[in-house]
Image (tube, helix red, strand yellow):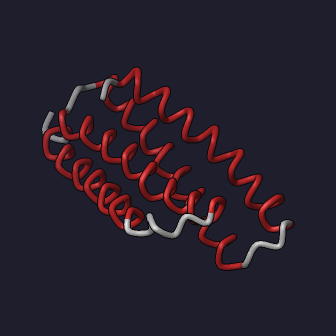
Amino acid sequence: MSAKFGFYVAALLCLTATGLGAYGAHGLAASGAAPNLVSAFNTAVQYQFLHGLALLFLVLALRVKIVKPLQWAMVFFTLGTFLFSGSIYALVLLGTKGIGFVTPLGGVCFMAGWLSVLLAGRTWLRS
């Protein structure tokens, strides 16, 4: 993933996390949704925000020095957000229970992204 594309993805993830967070705090809670669904929705928003900001950090790091594992981390964070947060949004907003198996795959992508950051540190810190 290029730094330019990653920048736009990061901004879009954070933009939509802001709107979804506001909906979760005001609209979803006020609609009488079950507390466990509101909690799951808020978890999805938090993970989306965290990894959107991490993606932005990686974009900035790649502007200084291109390190292949950082590029992989960007891919994993993006994929993880869509799988993890997206599946929770679908579950809460659409009642789609059949895709619950996707959520842990998103978590694995997040972990792979952070492992990629760890591996990038070996190259990054040597220079």
Residue 65 position, x and y percent, is 25, 26
Query: How many marks on residues?
Result: 0
* Residue 14 shown left or right of residue 67 in the figure: right
Residue lying at the far right of the rendered structure = 30
| Image point (20%, 43%), residue name | 120
Does 56 sit above or below residue 23? above
Q: Position of residue 68 (x, y in %)?
A: 18, 34
Q: Residue at x 50, y 43 (%)?
A: 53
- Which quadrant: the N terminus? top left
Q: In this rendering, is residue 3 above or below 38?
A: above
Q: Nearer the viewer, residue 99 or 10?
A: 99
Q: Position of residue 34 (x, y in %)?
A: 73, 78
The C terminus lies in quadrant:
top left
Q: Quadrant of residue 32?
A: bottom right
Along the viewing direction, whichever of 35 and 46 lies nearer the viewer: 35
Q: Position of residue 22 (x, y in %)?
A: 76, 52
Q: In the visual, does 79 lie left or right of 67?
A: right
Depicted 48 relative to depicted 6: above or below = below
Q: Horizontally, is 57 left or right of 125 in the view?
A: right
Residue at position x 84%, y 66% in the image: 31
Residue 23, quarter of picture: bottom right
Q: Quarter-wise, where is residue 123 in the image?
A: top left
Looking at the image, which residue is at 25% across and 55% down? 112
